[in-house]
Amino acid sequence: MNYRKLATMAAAIATSATMAAQGWPAAYEGVMLQGFYWNSYDATNWKNLESQADELSQYFKLIWIPQSGNCGAESMGYDPLYWFDNYKSAFGSEQELRSMIKTFKQKGLATIADVVINHRKSQYSMVDFPKETYKGNTYQLFSTDICHDDCNGTTAQWAAQNGCQLSQNNDTGDGVDFARDLDHKSANVQNCVKAYLDFLLNDLGYSGVRYDMVKGYSPEFTATYNLAAKPQFSVGEYFDYNKQAVANWISATTADGAIQSAAFDFPLRNAVRDAVNNNKWSKLSQGGLATDPTMSRYAVTFVENHDTQVRSDAQQDPVRTDTLAANAFILAMPGTPCVFLPHWTAYKAEIKNMILLRNLAGINSQSAWTQNESYTRQYVFTTTGTKGKLLAAIGASAADYTPATAG
């Protein structure tokens, strides 16, 4: 027996497993699509998305889709009821989901799961969760898996009146008032979440995860779950416009000497919104994680998403004008850009060209960039890729910009 060869193979397997769990690939060149928007049930059901696989896979390497489990009613998925059984959603059946993920994967398009584990909806009472079976094992959350301070003490009061007991641990982050906040210190919660991630990644075929509302629990748990699940891609929704706060969350997911998750670049999106809505393009100088070479690998940039778009129930926090200019900015910058589906459908030809230019220059998540000009009416920068340089002029007077050239 060749022990040296076996040792080499074991080391390679261990290295591969470690690399797969390091939050986000280094120098990643792909662009992601958010393949839904608020209440896009018909437009983005699994069949409709699968029918676009040929076109989407030519421009995107990742597609983030809605939470795909059963919420007990028509829902965007942010009030999950089931994690394993009755696996269907307002976007389609489990069979349709599996078919879509398989088709995407065959064409080089990896699917990102929307994972909601901060909270979970109960079934019949405030503390009643369904019993589910996966790989012959039974998984169920109990009242003792609910944070003691859930709903500012309302749940604890109900539990006392009904002979139930909650966890003795308070929430390690922010809470919600429409579902039960889970105690991630609980061994049972951790066991259920790890099995759920295994189901998503190794059974359904997802390639990565987008963790919803990571402000709701300590970042150490994101590290714990990713070390167990080893997703190729992990991005957290730490909804905060403070650059240092988001960077701190990313750093706090470190385990085994490596950062375990990327995050959406809300600080950069804030700069884009301020620049666009106020027609003051110098505000792009505020930057974000993507403009910081120590953080750009873990920055998933975006212009708009389902939480910021104008919705029927609220104005939210939208980018109101110059959508193309905003997309041009993120698509020419380091970080991993995530294009919002309504922008893709409204400006498909233009965004296709932007992605092609990004690819032509070989720009990746860690490419170097230089600010050339920063004025109220114009912002100019150059990003250096592996194949060339891309100069971008953004703003009201961008069309008049003439770069100095030599040679």
Image: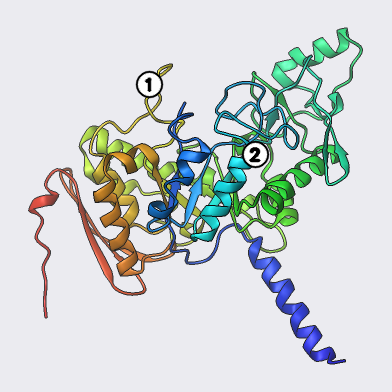
Of pointers 2 and 1, the one earlier in the residue sequence:
2
Q: In the image, residue 17 lies at what x, y percent?
A: 70, 67
Q: Amino acid at mark 2?
A: Glu
| Element type at mark 1 | loop
- Observer-side mark, 2 or 1, equals 2
Query: How many badges with numbers are in the image?
Result: 2
| Element type at mark 2 | helix
Residue for badge 2: 94
Of 7 and 396, the residue lying toward us: 7
Report whether residue 247 is seen.
no
Of 177 and 38, the residue lying toward us: 38
> Is the residue 92 above or below the residue 60 in the image?
above
For disc 1, the neighbor class at 10 Å (few under 14, some 14 to 19, many from 20) is few
Left or right: 140 with respect to 251? right
- Residue drawn 24% across the image and 50% down it: 350
Q: In the image, residue 237 lies at what x, y percent?
A: 55, 40
Extreme-right residue of the structure: 163
> Is the residue 337 above or below the residue 6 in the image?
above
> Is the residue 207 above or below the residue 168 in the image?
below
Q: CA distance from mark 2 to mark 1?
A: 33 Å
Residue for badge 1: 315
Quadrant position of residue 54: bottom left
